Amino acid sequence: MSRHRSFEEKIQIVDHYLKNGNQKATVQHFDISSSTLSQWVLMYQEKGPEALKVRRCHHTYTSEFKAMIVAEYLSTDIDYSALARKYNIRSHETVRKWVIAYTEGKKLKSTFGGTQSMMKSRKTTYEERLKIAQYHETHEISIRELSELFEVSYQQAYQYVKKYETTGQYGLEDRRGRRKVDSELTETDKLKRELEMERRKRKKVEVENAFLKKLEELERRRK
């Protein structure tokens, strides 16, 4: 799992990319994902260096503010990420949650900053654990936001993501039953696990390439 970067590190990485113009070399040199680099570059270009500062606490969002963001999303062609950058919202996933809640007829309640919400642990199915881990793999979202989105505890979300990263979908199986140890696995079982790990690697590359294409398109429009 990638580590958090300081404001100074983010500036260094973005500057390196803007001077050299080589995304692949930049992400490899600094060990970050293409999607993360794309997001930082867009924030830097649209809002300046201050947009990359690390925020330590939650923001306060009134119901009126949320309604305004949802209305702008629904009435224009602006996407979640652009709205998040425009209004200094922590993540595009936050905007997405508001839009989904509104379209499902749920009330947009005010949320207040200063403390981190503590979601209680709950029983989850294998399918839920897999969905949570795969969602984190394909979206730019923090563990805290992931736990809130799927209504599980922070520790649960972290464990699902970590297990999926290291052992694939098999690491998310229910541990209360007896599981096969490596010595008991058949050649078919081992092959299936290897294929799953390879599939996840290819999926990650596809997602990062999609973000790269989007960034290149935005840069062409500005010229």
Image (cartoon, rainbow, N blue to C red):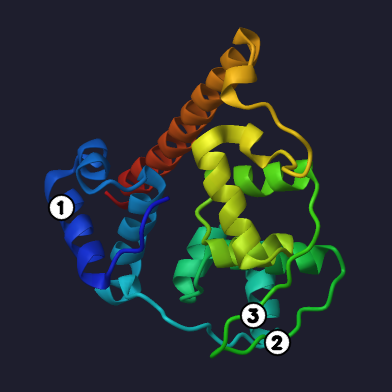
Q: Residues within 10 Å of mark 1 (few under 14, many from 20)?
A: some
Percent x, y for residue 216?
34, 41
Q: Amino acid at mark 2?
A: Ser
Q: Amino acid at mark 3?
A: Ser
Q: CA distance from mark 2 to mark 3?
A: 14 Å
From the viewer's perspective, is residue 27 above or below residue 46?
Answer: above
Q: Residue at x 23, y 48 (%)?
A: 30
Q: Amino acid at mark 1?
A: His
Badge 3 or badge 1: first in the primary sequence: 1
Count of residue discs: 3
Q: Nearer the viewer, mark 2 or mark 3?
A: 3
Residue 33 appears left or right of 184: left
Pointer 1: what residue? 16
Pointer 2: what residue? 110
Percent x, y for residue 94?
60, 68
Badge 1 or badge 2: first in the primary sequence: 1
Badge 2 or badge 3: first in the primary sequence: 2
Q: CA distance from mark 3 to mark 1?
A: 36 Å
Element type where label 1 sits in the image: helix
Q: Residue at x 61, y 49 (%)?
A: 160
Query: On the image, which quarter does residue 108 sit in?
Result: bottom right
Q: CA distance from mark 1 to mark 2?
A: 39 Å
Residue 205 appears left or right of 60: left
Q: Residues within 10 Å of mark 3 (few under 14, many from 20)?
A: few
Q: Nearer the viewer, mark 3 or mark 1?
A: 3
Q: Does the image show residue 77?
A: no
In the image shown, does 223 or 206 lie closer to the viewer? 206
The label on residue 117 is 3
Q: Are marks 3 and 1 in contact (CB under 8 Å)?
A: no
